[in-house]
Amino acid sequence: MLREAVDRLRAEADGLRRAMRSRGVIEQAKGMLTERLGCTPDEAFGHLVQLSQDTNRKLADIAAGLVGIAAPLEGDTAVDEDLPVPGPVTAPAAVPPRLQDPHPPVPAPPAAARLTPVPGLAARYHLAASALAGADTPEELARLLHEVALAPLGVLAVVLGLLEPDGALALVGSHGVEPRRISQWRRIPPETGVPLVAAAHGGGMVWEFDPDRPGERPPDTGRIVPGRIACAVPLRRGDRIVGAMSLGWEGRADRARAASRYVDALANLAAGHLLRVGAAGDGGPGLEVPGGEYWFRAVLDAMYAPVLVLSAVRRGVDGGSITDLRVGYANAAAGPGPAEGRRLSELHPGLVASGAFERILGAAADGVPYEGWTTDFTRPDTGAAGRLSLRAVPFLDGVLLTWRHRGGAAERAARLGEAHRLAGLGSFWWSAGSPGLELSEEALRMLGLDPGRAGATPAEVLACVAPADRPAVRLLARRLLAGQRNATLEVAVGTTGAGPRTVRVTAEALTAPAGGPARTVRGVVQDVTAWHRTEQALTAARARLAEQRRRAGAEHRMTRALQSALMPTPTGPDPSASGLDHAARYLPAGEQPRVGGDWYDLLPLPDGTVLLAVGDVSGHGVAAAVGMAELRHALRGLCYTGAGPAAVLGRLNTMLCHQGSRHIASVLCGLLDPAARALVWSAAGHPPPAVLRAGTAALAQGPAGTVLGADRATAYRDAELALRPGDTVLLWTDGLLNRREGGSGRPEPLLRAAEECGATALADCLDHIVAGLGGPNPADDSCLLAVRLPPAVEPGPGR
């Protein structure tokens, strides 16, 4: 009796449940008739009952057919409109609202294979919506979906799967499939290429046809649902994919594909109910929002690190690429202000600027975790820019994103490590009883050891030291362990491609307050290889510079001695015997004396004339001094032959051109006849002489000529200058006037300085001229020669 009562109550409950499933469609139909016929709800219900009796069809089917009339989609060939979304269960009600489907249509087949519309889909959709609202479990949902909405289309089986946080697909409900088959495919990894996974991760409808049909090739995967045709459809909740649905058909492929829009609409409808019954069930997958369970959010809120639960935002819906991520949940540490529902690119635009945003999208698309640093990031709580560490882990169809700002002790430790790396510094630590030394990454790198290891034993460290320095290291260790407080040592370690490295070890021993052996030894290791090599290079450079200075000094002294020997004070008959006053100055280069090729000569000749000559041989040093000596002695010898100045210069030019001398020379050669008060002179590329007469200085007029050694065919000419008693003749080389700063090479400054001398002593006059020109030339040597004729002798009183 009890069993019969239970069966009767269960049958009554099933009947009530079926009645409630159909009530929503019936109430919508009553509302339509009330509006269109202008009758009362009871009269509208009577019309429905009468129509059911006349057509011998169920009242729910009659109501669903009437409601479906308002829907523009009767088959899958209408692509501009969508299936209606069922409205609330109220009576009377207006025409239910329609939702514009964001899904693009499945591409139409060729004209030869136009799909045949499937009639009655709109009415069946409304009937299915009413039936699915009464499902309490995923299994019941799959059964109602199959029996009410899909079985009339020839569907053999339905399988429902939900995405799990790691990207796997969990089968939560099925109908028409053997339990053993479901058990074998209970949890499908994301790497498996079955259509269910492809639809869940790709976002598009996936078809699998019987391999016996020509032109169709199924994927190389196992079948979950029976039938000749299999179809997998993503389950969407808004713009988020929560799972996938697989259907098995027995029949023609074109008939199955004709209902693809209807199947897609049913998948969206089933997704909401699946999340509802999954969340209300055993706590498995199927959350309204990723991470939507209370305990999961409580765990996230308890974390110090900020965490965002992000879902994928795709370009389109049929397998489109991920363009952004939407925040499903943000824990308390993620910052103030509402974040749920916002896109990541809008919430944190700094991630886009730094390039980290693309890597986070890649983690969601590829399923590979990402961890890295970004620099251009603005903190949402303070608005300040800073550095942070990002980690993105695939979660459902999106990612779990967490980050850590660089600050506090971690920031200081990281900066200290970077400073050690830049300065070539490492540290080590040893305490009594420990088996080895603790070394920093930089210290391990200097020793040539793996930077990833925690430390090294004393034997391993000693093996890194050059054999010649190991005794010193042992001695240092013994002294530190015996109680010596501080010690420093430089040793060679390792051998790399660049050669041995030199490191400086500075160690400190810590002992007990009462003294005794060391309890701890700590210190730093610094790579001083570059400094050591620089010091060696500087020492070698100093040695080379000192040697060059020594050689230069020796050469200078030798050249000066040679010049003094070759150009002594004029000897022989004193020109002053004929009444001439003379003075000369040789001026080496001012800042750093350099012996050059400038020279002068004053020589009385046997015929009573006096040779006056100045010249400049190109170059400096010993070679120029030797060239000057050759030219000076040759000129002296030629003057003893009685030849005039022009003839002497011509023969000197022939000599230099014939010898192929490396030098050229400028020369002013003159023969002064004191008795006749006449100067015959000739110049080879040299300034003419100047005459100071009665306080006025002027240049003599005559041919300039070409420097000696330049052109064998050059002809030189003599010029004669008539002198008066008391006249002063000045000869000089160009180094006196050609200066780098303030020197134009023109003779006017020299002439003005000579005019200022007046009747002073000739030696004092030359010193005044040199001082007036700024002293010796810093860059070149020079000569200055002066000869003054005696003044006229006035007759005595008795004559």
Image (cartoon, grey):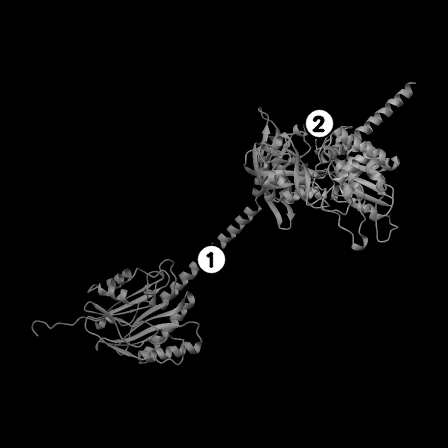
Sequence-wise, the earlier of marks 2 and 1 is: 2
* Image position, residue 144 (x, y; %): 82, 34
Q: Quadrant of residue 628?
A: bottom left
Question: Residue 168, relative to residue 212: is it above or below?
Answer: above
Q: Secondary structure at mark 2?
A: helix
* Image position, residue 671 (x, y; %): 28, 76
Question: Residue 544, relative to residue 723: is it above or below?
Answer: above
Question: Residue 135, relative to residue 197: is it above or below?
Answer: above
Q: Which mark is residue 779?
A: none
- Observer-nearest residue: 338 or 588? 338
In the rendered image, is residue 135 in sight?
Answer: no
Q: Amino acid at mark 2?
A: Trp
Q: Quadrant of residue 423?
A: top right
In the rendered image, is residue 653 in sight?
Answer: yes
Q: Which part of the image, by quadrant, shows the N terminus? A: top right
Q: Which-is-in-front pick, marks 2 and 1?
A: 2
Q: Amino acid at mark 1?
A: Gln
Q: Which part of the image, by quadrant, shows the C terminus? A: bottom left
* Image position, residue 305 (x, y; %): 64, 32
Alpha-carbon neighbours of circle 2 within 10 Å: few (<14), some, or many (≥20)? few
Residue furthest to the top in view is: 1
Q: Secondary structure at mark 1?
A: helix
Count of labels in the image: 2
Q: Residue at x 85, y 39 (%)?
A: 151
The residue wearing badge 2 is 295
Q: CA distance from mark 2 to mark 1?
A: 85 Å
Question: Residue 510, relative to residue 420: is it above or below?
Answer: above
Q: Which mark is residue 548?
A: 1
* Image position, residue 12 (x, y; %): 85, 24
